[in-house]
Amino acid sequence: MNEKSTPRLTVFQSECGITISFGDRTYFIDQTEAFHNIAVKALEMNDYIPFYVEVARREGKGEEFTNSLKHEIEKKVTGD
């Protein structure tokens, strides 16, 4: 059997903040960080996309990730 392991996003909320775990990486979002309010709203709405974006930003791939998203959106809009 040839199974391919893919990282999974896990999100924990506590009194101190929110912890994001993705693959072997873990990130803590303190209540004082601007992203904390976005993260709380995202959890309330069961919307995990902002967490993937935050992981990409923290990994230093924010610009690359943003450009990739823009390209995918443009393809959908133009039908290419």
Image: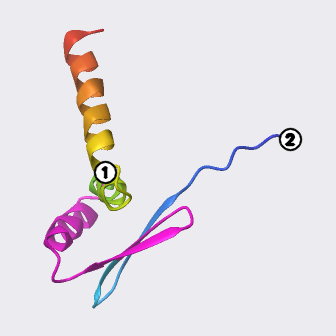
Q: CA distance from mark 1 to mark 2?
A: 31 Å
Provide the residue designation for mark 1. Answer: 49
Above or below 69: residue 14: below
**Residue at point 19%, 17% (across, down):** 77
- Residue 58: name its quadrant: bottom left
Helix, strand or loop for disc 1: helix
Which color scheme did the rendering employ for the protein?
A: rainbow
**Residue at point 25%, 40% (across, down):** 66
* Image quarter (top left, top right, bottom left or bottom right) of the N terminus: top right
Q: Which of the labelled discs sits on residue 1, or is there none?
A: 2
**Residue at point 56%, 66% (across, down):** 24
Report x, y in % for residue 25.
50, 68
Report x, y in % for residue 28.
35, 78
Report x, y in % for residue 75.
27, 17
- Report the magenta residues as a range: 19-47
Of all residues, the one furthest to the bottom in this rendering is 15
Q: Which amino acid, mark 2?
A: Met
Magenta highlight on residue 59: no
Does 44 sit left or right of 14 as displayed? Answer: left
Q: Nearer the viewer, residue 64 or 36?
A: 64
Of all residues, the one furthest to the right in this rendering is 1
